[in-house]
Image (cartoon, helix red, strand yellow):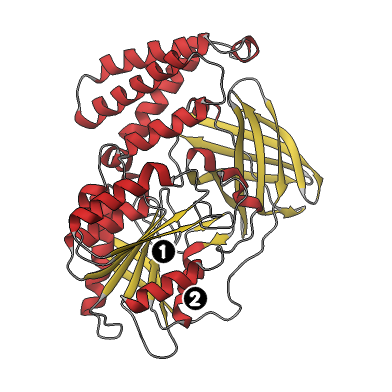
């Protein structure tokens, strides 16, 4: 999944971004050293009439599309500011060359060296787009902006509606220049398959606040799209398919379980456990490179989950907060001396981390997903289902998800098919390690056979 901010690295969230021509415009990737290793940072910056606008991605933590504001450039000197909650980070640096910027990151305290490099972009996008129409679809007082992609010839399959993963994303589900949904749409149109992709709430042409949406809100947006096309005089469809990538698979599964108009379901790197279980796995993975006593790590993770549960169900949050403070203090006190000495004030750091976690877990969308079990919906599916996994996916792993999804679909009694692309990462690109820090450097295209498999399955079901 485009992952949530899940680890103790959260306290060192960095902000840097930069773009080119000794203009900041472009996509840049860099890293900052934090306890446990390197925290990768991606910046996407666009030129505007007033200067620059841009976003920050922290792929290891699942933070995608966070706003940078303000962004300024004077000569070869640049400054970028990032805020989330009570955290404000500042990146200041200079162009070393056309392809690199170096400087320092600070977060109200000592600064840390930081650098970013311009990334390459090899794309799979066609030069001549298919027949596309931009639409605005109403869902109550929310406007959903999206693109309908139509075949130039005969329509051979249901209208495919695509739901993106975690984090506020545009209709193309663009990650580090890889326009996932746009590429899928264009390819399917060539095979006679129509599709609709849309901006998440608060992104592009869609209104609302993505961070305040719950799983029910996300599903209602897909339902509104279905109702629009059922009743449209100019773009009428009566049968639908739903594709969900990563967290979008949770939304797609919920809609397919509740709407008989969904005739096909495609789960693309989709999750089976609740978010709380996924976060446990991610935090354990983040700690795996450290030398901290494992019993202390487990106590910290258990205390996190106690805090999640208290916030979700409103049970004695103060007690859970105190438990987490004690557990995280023990972790920091047992860091290697070099890392421990780099922390100016452990008490202050622990309190900041605790408040950040409370803020994250209290966000409506996160709160609605923490203990939501997607397989409960899959047990009710009647539509044929295609389940796609990347063999090198380190975010939604086969080991953690495949058997649970299979068991749920068996229980549902529907027809289903699993397909694993051995060399694919979470975005279904050809990958070396599958880690998220590879994303900026990979070709912007899917592994061989991926698009064709989706098309063939849709045309035969």
Residue to which mark 1 is pinned: 205
Among the two numbered marks 2 and 1 on one chain, the one whose residue lies closer to the N terminus: 2
| In the image, residue 8 above or below residue 239 | above
Pointers 2 and 1 in contact (C-beta within 8 Å): no
| Residue at 42 percent of width and 51 percent of height | 168
- From the viewer's perspective, is 32 left or right of 218? right
Say which residue appears at 40% left-offset and 19% top-offset: 298
On the question of residue 131 being in view, the answer is: no
Which is more toward the observer, 102 or 394?
394
Q: In the rendered view, would you say 78 is above or below 331?
A: below
Disc 1 secondary structure class = loop
Residue 284 location, quadrant: top left
The disc at residue 369 is none
Q: Is residue 417 visible?
A: yes
Q: Residues within 10 Å of mark 2 (few under 14, many from 20)?
A: many
Q: CA distance from mark 2 to mark 1?
A: 20 Å
- Crowd around label 1: few <14 · some 14–19 · many ≥20 (10 Å): some
Q: Residue at x 51, y 29 (%)?
A: 286
Residue 461 horizontal/vertical position (percent): 30, 75
Residue 207 position within the rendered picture, expressed as x and y whole percent measured from the top left: 35, 58
Residue picked out by circle 2: 186
Q: Is residue 121 left or right of residue 168?
A: right
Q: In the figure, 271 relative to 104: above or below? A: below
Q: Nearer the viewer, residue 129 or 433?
A: 433
Residue farthest to the bottom, as pictured: 153
Q: Position of residue 299 (x, y in %)?
A: 38, 16
- Say which element carries label 2: helix
**Is 311 situated above or below 293?**
below
């Amino acid at each position: 999944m485009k992952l949530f901010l899940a680890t103790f690295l959260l306290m060192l969230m960095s902000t840097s971004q930069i773009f080119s021509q000794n203009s900041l415009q472009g996509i840049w990737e860099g890293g900052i050293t934090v306890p446990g290793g390197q925290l990768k940072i991606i910046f996407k910056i666009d030129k505007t009439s007033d200067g620059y606008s841009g976003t920050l991605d922290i792929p290891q933590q699942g933070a995608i599309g966070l706003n940078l504001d303000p962004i300024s450039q004077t000569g070869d000197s640049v400054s970028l500011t990032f805020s989330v909650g009570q955290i404000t980070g500042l990146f200041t640096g200079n162009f070393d060359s056309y392809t690199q910027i170096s400087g320092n990151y600070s977060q109200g305290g000592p600064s840390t060296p930081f650098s970013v490099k311009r990334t390459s972009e090899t794309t799979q996008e066609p030069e001549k787009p298919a027949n596309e129409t931009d639409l605005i679809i109403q869902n109550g007082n929310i406007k959903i902006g999206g693109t309908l992609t139509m075949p130039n010839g005969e329509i051979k399959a249901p209208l495919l509606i695509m739901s993106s993963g975690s984090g506020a994303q545009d209709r193309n589900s663009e990650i580090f220049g890889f326009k996932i949904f746009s590429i899928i749409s264009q390819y399917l149109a060539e095979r006679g398959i129509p599709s609709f992709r849309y901006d998440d709430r608060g992104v592009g042409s869609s209104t609302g606040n993505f961070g305040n949406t719950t799983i029910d809100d996300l599903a209602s947006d897909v339902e509104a799209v279905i109702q629009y096309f059922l009743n449209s005089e100019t773009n009428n469809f009566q049968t639908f398919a739903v594709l969900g990538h990563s967290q979008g698979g949770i939304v797609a599964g919920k809609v397919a379980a509740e709407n008989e108009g969904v005739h096909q379901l495609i789960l693309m790197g989709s999750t089976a456990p609740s978010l709380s279980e996924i976060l446990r796995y991610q935090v354990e993975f983040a700690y795996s490179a450290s030398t901290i006593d494992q019993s202390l790590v487990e106590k910290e993770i258990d205390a996190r989950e106690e805090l999640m549960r208290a916030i979700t169900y409103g049970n004695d949050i103060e007690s859970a907060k105190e438990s987490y403070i004690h557990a995280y203090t023990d972790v920091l006190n047992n860091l290697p001396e070099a890392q421990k000495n780099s922390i100016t004030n452990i008490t202050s750091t622990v309190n900041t981390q605790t408040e950040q976690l409370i803020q994250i877990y209290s966000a409506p969308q996160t709160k609605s997903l923490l203990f939501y079990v997607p397989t409960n919906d899959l047990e009710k599916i009647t539509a044929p289902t295609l389940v796609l996994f990347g063999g090198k996916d380190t975010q939604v792993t086969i080991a953690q998800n495949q058997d649970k999804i299979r068991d749920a679909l068996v229980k549902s009694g529907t027809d289903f098919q699993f397909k694993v692309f051995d060399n694919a990462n979470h975005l279904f690109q050809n990958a070396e390690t599958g880690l998220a820090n590879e994303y900026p450097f990979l070709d912007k295209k899917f592994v061989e056979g991926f698009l064709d498999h989706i098309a063939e399955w849709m045309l035969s079901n």
